[in-house]
């Protein structure tokens, strides 16, 4: 097994606790506009690398993601954009389009890194989650919000369709096509109570501090479970979400035909019988 990453990034702060929980914070002074965190090229790059590193780090078993500043995310910085690469206007339209597709897929891969990470990710949303903040939060496994949190699919207000995950994931998170279309067509704010009611978040907290404390507590509980069981559960949930029931069951049968041979099962049974916590090996 390779050594753990050092988790040093320009725009992301990572704190790894001895119990296997990592707290990832979107954190850099230059990312603030009026104390709102915005998505710049450097942050998009660092999110991708952070979750790739976490995915391969056997010392980490669960993750909490939060934003620094006054709100979780104010979305994309429209002045800087998300790319440092300039596309030549001298190229013909087709070639400009291919170059743009390459960039969009890179941006999408950064957001999807939360979903593709084998460790469960709890997203803590305080104040606003706007535009790309929705993309990022829906790529997580569990979402908590503060009572002052609000959620906005902002893209139509800047003349485009959301293109890095919201239109693909939000329908599956909420499961209400009418509500999703209303949110996406109008860019209206959805506040915490409605977000809880429709299932975008599953807990509301008075303060950001209380929310992160609870998220770390839940992440710590997840970290005590068999890593084989947790990684397998996330893998199978994600696969089954995107496939039919029969396809999901078939995939599960193939997956678990190997995973059922883990030593973690007898260890779990023994721990249950002795009423003592089990000690599981790292993956």
Image: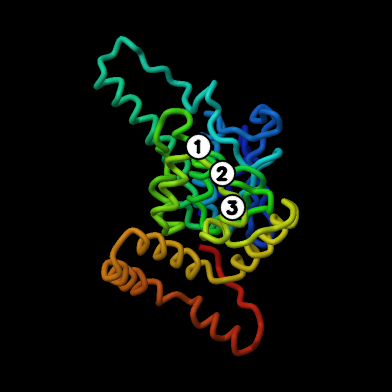
Q: Residue 198's spot in the image, x, y percent?
A: 51, 59
Q: Residue 114's spot in the image, x, y percent?
A: 49, 49
Which quadrant holds residue 37? top right
Q: Is residue 39 above or below residue 279?
A: above
Q: Judge by depth and name the residue closer to the eye, 78 or 175.
A: 175
Proximity of marks 1 and 2: CB atoms separated by less than 8 Å? no
Under circle 3, the secondary element is strand
Q: CA distance from mark 3 to mark 2?
A: 19 Å
Q: Residue at x 55, y 64 (%)?
A: 282
* Side of 92 where 123 appears, left or right: right
Q: Is residue 219 above or below residue 80?
A: below
Q: Label 3: which residue?
A: 123
How crowded pointer 2 is (Cα within 10 Å; few <14, some 14-19, many 20+) is rated as: some
Q: Earlier in the sequence, mark 1 or mark 2?
A: 1
Q: CA distance from mark 1 to mark 2?
A: 9 Å
Under circle 1, the secondary element is loop
Q: Earlier in the sequence, mark 3 or mark 1?
A: 3
* Side of 203 where 57 appears, left or right: left
Labels 1, 2: front one? 2
Is any atom of residue 118 visible in this view? yes
Under circle 2, the secondary element is loop
Q: Residue 250's spot in the image, x, y percent?
A: 28, 70
Q: Label 1: which residue?
A: 154
How crowded pointer 1 is (Cα within 10 Å; few <14, some 14-19, many 20+) is rated as: many
Q: Earlier in the sequence, mark 3 or mark 2?
A: 3
Q: CA distance from mark 3 to mark 1?
A: 19 Å
How crowded pointer 3 is (Cα within 10 Å; few <14, some 14-19, many 20+) is rated as: many
Q: Residue at x 33, y 24 (%)?
A: 99
Q: How is the image coloured?
A: rainbow
Q: Residue at x 37, y 17 (%)?
A: 87
Q: Label 2: which residue?
A: 189
């Amino acid at each position: 097994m390779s050594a753990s990453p050092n988790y040093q990034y320009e725009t992301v702060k990572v704190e790894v606790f001895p119990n296997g929980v990592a707290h990832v914070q979107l954190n850099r002074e230059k990312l603030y506009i009026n104390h709102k965190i915005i998505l710049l090229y450097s942050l998009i790059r660092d999110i991708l690398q952070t979750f790739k590193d976490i995915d391969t780090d056997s010392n980490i078993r669960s993750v909490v993601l939060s934003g620094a500043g006054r709100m979780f995310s104010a979305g994309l910085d429209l002045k800087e954009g998300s790319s440092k690469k300039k596309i030549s206007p001298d190229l013909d339209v087709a070639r400009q389009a291919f170059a743009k597709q390459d960039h969009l897929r890179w941006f999408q891969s950064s957001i999807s890194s939360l979903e593709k990470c084998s460790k469960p990710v709890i997203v803590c949303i305080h104040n606003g989650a706007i535009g790309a903040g929705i993309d990022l939060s829906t790529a997580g496994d569990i979402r908590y919000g503060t009572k002052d949190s609000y959620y906005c699919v902002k893209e139509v207000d800047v003349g485009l369709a959301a293109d890095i995950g919201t239109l693909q994931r939000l329908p599956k998170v909420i499961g209400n096509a009418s509500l999703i279309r209303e949110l996406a067509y109008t860019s209206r704010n959805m506040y915490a109570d409605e977000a809880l009611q429709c299932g975008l978040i599953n807990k509301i907290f008075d303060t950001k501090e209380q929310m992160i404390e609870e998220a770390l507590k839940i992440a710590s509980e997840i970290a005590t479970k068999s890593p084989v069981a947790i990684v397998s559960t996330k893998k199978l949930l994600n696969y089954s979400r995107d496939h039919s029931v029969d396809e999901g069951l078939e995939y599960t049968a193939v997956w678990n035909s190997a995973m059922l041979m883990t030593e973690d099962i007898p260890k779990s049974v023994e721990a249950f019988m002795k009423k003592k916590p089990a000690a599981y090996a790292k993956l």
